Image (cartoon, rainbow, N blue to C red):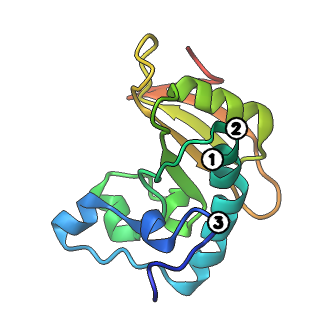
Amino acid sequence: MDLSTKLSQHFTIRELIHSDTALRLGIDNTPPEDVINPLIIVCCRILEPVRTHFQVPFSPNSGYRCSELNQALRGSKTSQHIFGQAVDFEIPGIPNYELAKWISANLIYDQLILENYTPGKPNSGWVHCSLVSGQNRMQLLTINGSDRRRGLIA
C-alpha cells in the first residue's frame, strides 16, 4: 500500500493512519482495503469542508486505528476509528469549541464530540467526528473524562 496515496485533495493515507503510540509499541496500523473507502468519505465530507472553511492546513490527530492500537489507546471496543469512519483533529489557531460549533451547524455527521475541552482554554481537548454510510445520528456530545453531556458545553 502506497501511504502517500491521496484520499482527498489535502489528506493522505499516511496522515489518516499515523500514530505515535503505534510507532512506540511497534503496532502495524496499516488498514485493510475495506477501510479505504470509509476513510475517503471522512476526508471528503468532514476534513475537506473544514479545511476549506477555516483555510488552515492541518493533519488529523487520529484516524484509522487497528484493533490492537485502539486497545492500547483504551478506545471503545466499538470505536468507529476501527472501521475508518472517525477522525480526531484540531486546527492550529482555531478554538476547538468554535470548530465543533461550525461542524454541528454545517456538516452531516454520525457523532460529533468535543472531547476533554475546558471552557476558557480554547486549545484544550480535540474534536472527534464520525460519518457512516446511510443514516447518520447527528449525535452531538461534550465529554470530559466520565462526564458525558448532550450538546456542546462551552
Do the numbered discs 2 and 1 sit on residues whose CB atoms are within 8 Å? Answer: no
- Residue 51 image label: 1
- Give the spatial CA distance, label 1 vs label 3: 10 Å
Asked if 45 appears above or below 68 in the picture, the reply is above
Secondary structure beneath dot 1 equals: helix
Location of residue 138 (image quadrant): top right
- Residue 27 image label: none
- Residue 139 image label: 2
Q: Amino acid at mark 1?
A: Arg
Task: Please report the residue visible at 46 percent of the width from the left and 86 percent of the height from the top.
Answer: 2
Answer with mark 2 or mark 1, whichever residue precedes in sequence.
1
Secondary structure beneath dot 2 equals: strand
Report the front residue among 123 and 87: 123
Task: Please report the residue visible at 33 percent of the width from the left and 65 percent of the height from the top.
Answer: 69
- Give the spatial CA distance, label 3 vs label 2: 27 Å
Location of residue 22 (image quadrant): bottom left
